[in-house]
Amino acid sequence: MKVAILVPPRPYFLKQKALPNLGILTVSAVLKKLGHEVEVLDFADGFQFVDADLYGIYVSTPDFRVCIDILNWLKKGGARKVVAGGP
């Protein structure tokens, strides 16, 4: 299964990529170990659609509204399975 894990932009951080999300990287590593193809996309660089069987969106409270925008964008792009989670 091809899985895309999406990290929303976090403009409230001075440097968006200064703190890598170890939780997402751990999930990615476990999925890869189980034989899945995984791509982690950081949307700080802009939204980029990739074809996948399953999409995961990292959500935290300050990111909720932009995550809804990402969900709607994915649906318009044809995504059928989307999950969201976070701390």
Image (cartoon, rainbow, N blue to C red):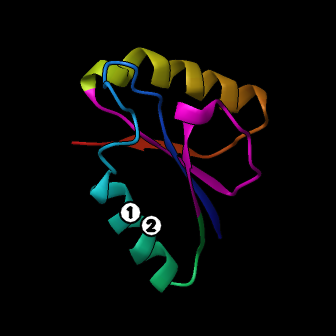
Q: Is 35 on the left-hand or right-hand side of 12?
A: right
Residue plotted at (29% across, 57% down) = 23
> What residue type is disc 2 on?
Ser
Relative vertical location of residue 60 with respect to residue 21 in this rendering, above or below: above
Q: In the rendering, which numbered label is found on residue 57? A: none
Residue plotted at (71% across, 40% down) = 79
Indicate yes or no whether the magenta region holds residue 55: yes
Give SS at disc 2.
helix
Q: Position of residue 29 (x, y in %)?
A: 42, 74
Task: State the residue in front, 44 or 37.
Answer: 44
Relative vertical location of residue 45 with respect to residue 19 in this rendering, above or below: above
Q: Is 82 on the left-hand or right-hand side of 17?
A: right
> What residue type is disc 1 on?
Leu
Q: Residue furthest left?
A: 87
Relative vertical location of residue 85 with respect to residue 31 in this rendering, above or below: above
Task: State the residue in front, 30 or 53.
Answer: 30
Residue plotted at (38% across, 62% down) = 25
Q: Which residues are magenta?
A: 39-60
Task: State the residue in front, 83 or 61.
Answer: 61
Give SS at disc 1.
helix
Question: Neighbour class for label 2 at 10 Å: few (<14), some, many (≥20)?
Answer: many
Indicate yes or no whether the magenta region holds residue 48: yes
Contact between labelled residues 1 and 2, with CB atoms less than 8 Å apart: yes
Question: Neighbour class for label 1 at 10 Å: few (<14), some, many (≥20)?
Answer: few
Q: CA distance from mark 2 to mark 1?
A: 5 Å
The residue where tag 1 is placed is 25
Q: Position of residue 14 (x, y in %)?
A: 32, 24
Q: Quadrant of the N terminus?
A: bottom right
Q: Position of residue 81 (x, y in %)?
A: 61, 46
Q: Quadrant of the C terminus?
A: top left
The residue where tag 2 is placed is 28
Q: Position of residue 78 (x, y in %)?
A: 78, 37
